[in-house]
Amino acid sequence: MRTHSPENERVKRAYFTYLKEARRLSEPSIDAAAAALSRFEEYTRYRDFKSFHLQQAVAFKHRLAEQVSARTGERLSKRTLFGTLNALRAFFQWLAGQSGFRSRLTYADADYFALSEKETRIAKASLERPVPTLEQIQHVLQSMPDATDVQLRNRAVIAFTLLTGARDGAIASMKLKHADIVEGKVLQDAREVRTKFSKTFTTLFFPVGDDVRQIVVDWVTFLTREKLFGATDPLFPATRVVLDQDRCFQAGGLSRSHWSNASPIRAIFKEAFAGAGPPYANPHSFRKTLAQLGERTCRTPEEFKAWSQNLGHEQVLTTFSSYGQVGHERQAELIRSLTSTVDRPPNGEAIEQVRRLLEDARHRLG
């Protein structure tokens, strides 16, 4: 039985290069496309893509809907179906324009990988996910041990994530020179830091508590004065692995190397939240915590615009739509509070600031 098609492998390699170099997609996005193609090839028993016909797409779609997840034991979710089929749809649209396939495929052929409108709405529905409160995160920090170098680093990682809202990939690649504890800011330099969309921007420390800031200050001071780390050394170094007396691997303090990816940071978060009690919150959820804090703290649209830029968002609507969803309890609290303010005169200054922001946005969009 065939386990691969040499011709398909050449085509896929060209497609992945296109995704990386032309579409500028990240490695996880390319991996997701590769997984979708692997599923489709396995179903067709690795027939050449040149033999593609519409019935394959329709039959594969039905087969995929019947598959069971190995993790949950239930049928694949609509979100998984949507992501897999969308990846295949994009691939065959690209393939239809390639030499040797133009006479065999049309762009419309790729549309047979689409879900129904009803299924698409289900797949794209966004459910409210728990967002850690500032108090919960502070409790986790207070509960974390700090007796060893590694424990100090782990606590500082969580404090730094809250203090800056930086993404875990960026944090894993930061150097000491990027953090300025005197000015209270961090430079996310895309030439050296793995930022989203390779954007370079400066983040001021968010006002999340002096105790949180002090943890980061103490950590940077510890690295520079006690460990004699230099400007180009990692801000959060990887753990040095050594052999114990039984020839088993164990942690042996800090190395002078960066983490290769953000997986160790997510592991630190899981362990910290499990030990402290609150439900697990991944590093990215801290950005939502900060967005919600900004909604409560900022008094004018201009202040919230500055808060949004501090998160690395060029458009304030990104903060509102992607991070600023109001929880049900807070939603009820706000609506009830508005019943006593509906007769108040409008705030002229705030309205004027909103008007200026809209004018600026309209000007940028032409």
Image (cartoon, grey):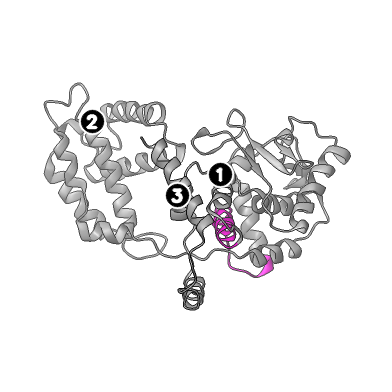
Where disc 2 sits, the SS reads helix
| Amino acid beneath label 2 | Leu
Judging depth in this view, the residue of 151 and 176 nearest the camera is 176
Q: Please report whichever mark, 3 or 2, sits nearer to the chain's N-terminal start.
A: 2
Residue 352 placement, left or right of 202:
left
Picture coordinates of residue 303, whole percent (x, y): 58, 51
Q: Nearer the viewer, mark 3 or mark 2?
A: 3
Task: Left or right? Give the position of 50 relative to 320.
Answer: left
Distance, label 1 to label 2, CA atoms, is 39 Å
> Mark 1 or mark 2, which is nearer to you?
1
Question: Residue 44 occupies which quadrant of the picture?
Answer: top left
Magenta residue check for 11:
no
Residue density around tag 3, few if under 14, some if 14–19, many if 20 or more, within 10 Å: few
- Circle 2 residue: 95
Classify mark 1: helix, strand or loop. helix
Residue 221 at x, y percent in the picture: 84, 43
Q: Residues within 10 Å of mark 2 (few under 14, many from 20)?
A: many
Q: Residues within 10 Å of mark 1 (few under 14, many from 20)?
A: some
In the rendered view of the protein, which quadrant contains the N terminus?
top left
Decide which of 3, 141 is in the foreground and name it: 141
Vertical side of 283 occupied by 127: above or below? below
Would you name the residue on which mark 1 appears?
309
Marks 1,2: beta carbons within 8 A? no
Mark 1 or mark 2, earlier in chain: 2
Magenta stretch bounds: 275-296
Residue at image position (67%, 67%) is: 135
- What x and y, as percent, mark residue 208? 69, 57
Query: Of the residues shown, which amino acid type is indicated by label 3?
Result: Arg
Q: Disc 3 marks which residue?
A: 355
Q: Is residue 89 left or right of residue 265?
A: left
| Nearer the observer, 225 or 30 | 225
**Which mark is on residue 93?**
none
